[in-house]
Amino acid sequence: MRHHDEGRDHDEADLEIRPQEDHAAGPTAVAVSMKRSLEHMGVRRTAETLLRLNQAEGFDCMSCAWPDPDPGHRHKAEFCENGAKAVAEEATRSRATPEFFARHSIADLDSHSEHWLGQQGRITHPMVKRPGATHYEPVDWDEAFGLIGDQLNALGSPDEAIFYTSGRASNEAAFAYQLFVRAFGTNNLPDCSNMCHESTSIALQESIGIGKASVVMEDVYNAKLIVLQGQNPGTNHPRMLSALEKAKQNGAKILSINPLREAGLVNFKNPQTPRGMVGSGTDLSDMHLPIALNGDLALLQAFGSLLVEWDALDHAFIDQHTIGVELWKQHVAAIDWDVVTESTGLSREQITDAATLLRDSDATVFCWAMGLTQHRNSVAIIKEITNLALAQGNIGKRGAGLFPVRGHSNVQGDRTMGIWERPPGHFLDALEKEFHFDPPRENGYDTVDSIRAMRDGKAHFFLGLGGNFVQAAPDTEVTAAALRKTRMTVHISTKINRSHLVCGETALILPTKGRTEKDVQASGPQFVSVEDSTCSVHASRGPLDPASPHLESEVGIVTRIAEATIGDRYGLDWKGMRDDYANIRMHISRVVPGCEGYEVNVRRPGGFILPNPPRDSRTFETRSGRAEFAVSPIEVVQVPPGHVILQTLRSHDQFNTTIYGYSDRYRGIEGGRRVIFLHRDDIASLGFDNGDMVDLFTRWDGDERVRCARNFRIVEYDTPRGSAAAYYPETNPLVPLDSTALGSNCPTSKSVVISLARAKGKDPDQAGDQDEVGADWTHKTDPEPHHLS
């Protein structure tokens, strides 16, 4: 098998700025998908995987959590460009064998880019970095599990261990994982939700009693108005474009609200239709509001003010189902329009025109993603969206509802299965009844608090079920230093990533089977289940033989860690769960609300939809028993002169921290990633020219350390004055660990106040694209400390 490790690493000098595409998908997407798939998988594996991707008897995409159409309405090619890339990454024929790890020290691997690491292929054997060692070496599974069990049992308290989960773990693995962790004695179950939709979960739970979408796919198709806010479906949820096209054909209007005018918000060329392949495609947005960063709360309250002024309210719904409307009406009626226009960058006329779309619609679906959830006031922003939906009765009726669009394939399912550091009492009660032990009742650490705990010496063990923690988390240098202070780091992974190179005293990589692969256990072939953004739960069955005979499934790894750590404590039958996943689903049916009859229901083509009281019966399991209007003061980020607000975002050629390549063709970027998008007037006022190379800086209240990300090329872009954008994880070092959303502790990756200076320092390509700041480095234009209020 050919290895990629001898090829040259990427050189940012290849970066080119090309014309942006003004539409999403179309023939180019098809060509890119097939080219990437054939290069990585070959003809046979491409056919075996892509034709079964997102099919009722196939496997679920490991990329975003966009819902599948009903089984009878799915295309033979039910996938998007980025879904095909995700499959190609996992089903690649390349392998990272023990010989590969012997050739490359950890320091050598760390000198390469994230993209290069991912191209080395699937990890074939469990690997260990022993204390003081410079290389990973192979280890047999029994010893690996023994090392983990010994380390966990040597801790002074279970709360000294961190058990992280990415959004790819199956429901079965997630349920077994949280069961083990709670039987071990802690609720330290941070997950990637803490860094993305945690603000949504908190806001919706407090407002309507459940932190999930109140729509099904038919509501999207039948909406009169769809509001897309803080979301870029063309890159992050490409199959959503097909649903929006169908809604447009059914007469819907679309209002898009986003700082960048993204291709996916403008025009869609559906590769499944002749019009999409050779025609002009479908124009999507009827109106686009180029809102300034963090202007969303002010805009939403302005909408509310106008709806109250016009009396465009559903009084019957409000009277029967809500509480707190009078205080909300008084609050929005008194808004300061000067504050609104200044903070949004929009005119009163633009806002009024957009509000008329809301006024004239009797069925509105509100969609949002990370653009709204990663601000200091994100919980308030989501509650304000909910206020608008409640004011017009847009919950629990056809074609209407709240739709937080999840960005990772089973992040919602993992939370349903109990992956949460703040589990509700009824869930713990059900665990106690089912398994006859009293689970811990104190809240555990979320992601940000887990980093603090490792940094401060309060936690000494880290286990990651999937993901790339050091690259996904904020404040990269702080996160890396915290992980290096631990006694053991363990990563359950399919491929090499940066987190494997940020090691505790002992480090383990446990290679797992992927979503594309067959899973055969003692009782025979197994399947797993997942949940999408609309609460639909369905089965997933991989078609390929595993990449190596030495791989274990996620369920197998979790249950064997449990056996090595707590043995038969409480009489938990880990082997029975591992041998037959139906045993896990039996427990799920008795513990998880809405999962009664789980085994039968999940085997149906297309699965089943979990109950949702606001959607199903207009009932709200809040403290008051009604949906609750919230009153939130408008908060504006204070930006000192000579600074801009930065939002971190994805390129079209990545999924979360996985870098597929260096092409962001919708934004006109080819061959590089270290770019910062700025308005032309900001470029001039800051004293730069388009194309200049700059370093980026930020500071935080009470923290004397200057955070820096080096060597970014300025790219003039259609974005509001004062609002900048750049790709993560390259800019994650700029997100202060302590800059989090009120109420959710979600990192504020969309509200980073930065300054720019002409680039000076080491070429990032010589350091694996890692941003470094020398301890003695200073700059005369460093910003004064500030707080993102």
Image (tube, helix red, strand yellow):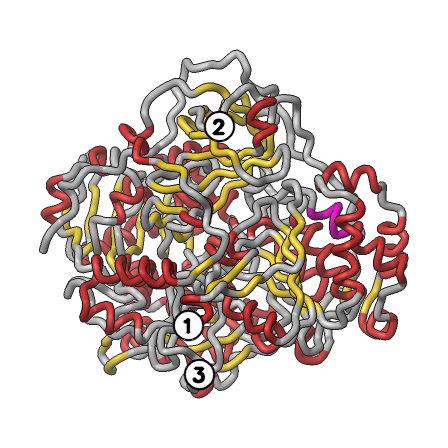
User: Where residue 340 sits: x, y (%)?
Assistant: 78, 42
Q: Is residue 624 visible from the viewing direction of this image?
A: no
Indicate the secondary structure of the residue bearing disc 2: loop
Q: Amino acid at mark 2?
A: Asn
Indicate the secondary structure of the residue bearing disc 1: loop
Q: Amino acid at mark 1?
A: Gln
Which residues are drawn in magenta? Answer: 296-301
Give how far apart the Cα atoms at labels 3 and 2 are.
49 Å
Q: Is residue 75 visible from the viewing direction of this image?
A: yes
Q: Nearer the viewer, mark 3 or mark 2?
A: 2
Q: Which mark is residue 45?
A: none
Q: Which mark is residue 272?
A: 1
First reached walking from the N terminus: tag 3 or tag 2: 3
Q: Amino acid at mark 3?
A: Pro
As for residue 405 lying within the magenta part, the answer is: no
Q: Residues within 10 Å of mark 3 (few under 14, many from 20)?
A: some
**Whether residue 625 is situated above or below residue 306 in the rendered picture:** below
As for residue 297 lying within the magenta part, the answer is: yes
The residue sitting at 31% across, 38% down in the picture is 502
Give the position of the N terminus as an image quadrant. Answer: bottom left
Q: Depth check: 147 or 356 in front?
A: 356
Q: Which residue is mark 3?
A: 71
Give how far apart the Cα atoms at labels 2 and 1 are.
38 Å
Q: Which mark is residue 690?
A: 2
Q: Residues within 10 Å of mark 1 (few under 14, many from 20)?
A: some
Direction from residue 772 to residue 295 in the image, left or right: right
Q: Residues within 10 Å of mark 2 (few under 14, many from 20)?
A: some
**Whether residue 225 is situated above or below residue 11 in the rendered picture:** below
